[in-house]
Image (spheres, grey):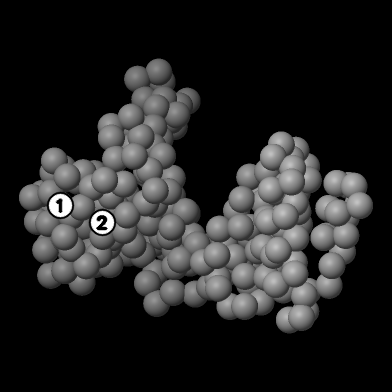
Amino acid sequence: MDFDHRITALMQMPLMPQTWDSMLRECEAIELSNPYIPSGYLWVVEYKRYQVALVKGDVWQAMKHLKAAVSLVPYNDQLLDEYVRLCQRESSIDCLVLIIASKRNETQVLELAKHFDVLGIAYAIVTGTGTEILHPRVVQVEVPDNYENIGRKVIAAYTWVYENLSPNMAVLQISDTMRVENADQLLHALAQLKSKTAYVGVSVEAGLEHDRCRHWGRC
């Protein structure tokens, strides 16, 4: 059976308990025998792995393989719809503060965390690979923890919220060098912001001094 027929047969293979193992073996065999598979075909391999992981109840692996499939064929609406459905969940948290943290500012980060604990504000401390801050609310994303990758770390943090908590959650992103100056004002602002869709920043139309693209990349 040639490559095209094997991919077609894999895609059409029914998803039943008795076919799970053979389906995964065929995915591996196709990759081993074809080291250069175009993305227009390779997505099928990741998609079938996603299906098997999902029916087995391994949502983490299912998400991993579905995202790999989406990255191979990003304009496939079916895959995008499945990703959105997989992320649909409700959370008891309606507003979350993301502290984008670095090891250099660990002292300030832990001080901020204490303030939020006292105020009863839900938060997460976001670090990148290679950075360890000992705190129960640390979320480590798979992005190099350096200045040049701050934008990527922020995107990974938002993705983590979307996939693990809820796609319908208000998020306030702050730098690890910020301080709580007025607790009452902060609580009031959070109550206001979580009730509406708001972009807290200045759009590019306001002038070249504050380009939205640069704003995204920096913070």
- In this picture, residue 94 sits left or right of residue 125: right
User: Where, by quadrant of the figure, is residue 59 drawn?
Assistant: bottom right
Identity of the residue drawn at 90% across and 47% down: 2
User: Where, by quadrant of the figure, is residue 102 drawn?
Assistant: top left
Residue 186: which numbered mark, if any?
Answer: none
Residue with the mark numbered 2: 125
> As shown in the figure, which amino acid type bears the numbered disc 1?
Val
Residue 218, given in percent of the width and then of the height, sits at 33, 32
**Residue 108 visible in this rendered orientation of the protein:** yes
Of the image marks 2 and 1, the number of the one nearer the N terminus: 1
Q: Residues within 10 Å of mark 2 (few under 14, many from 20)?
A: many
Query: Can you say whether 108 is above or below 121 in the image?
Result: above
- In this picture, residue 172 sits left or right of residue 51: left
Residue with the mark numbered 1: 109
> As shown in the figure, which amino acid type bears the numbered disc 2?
Ile
Kind of element beneath mark 2: strand
Identity of the residue drawn at 37% across and 51% down: 141
> Do the residues under discs 2 and 1 have CB atoms within 8 angstroms?
yes
Looking at the figure, which quarter contains the C terminus?
A: top left
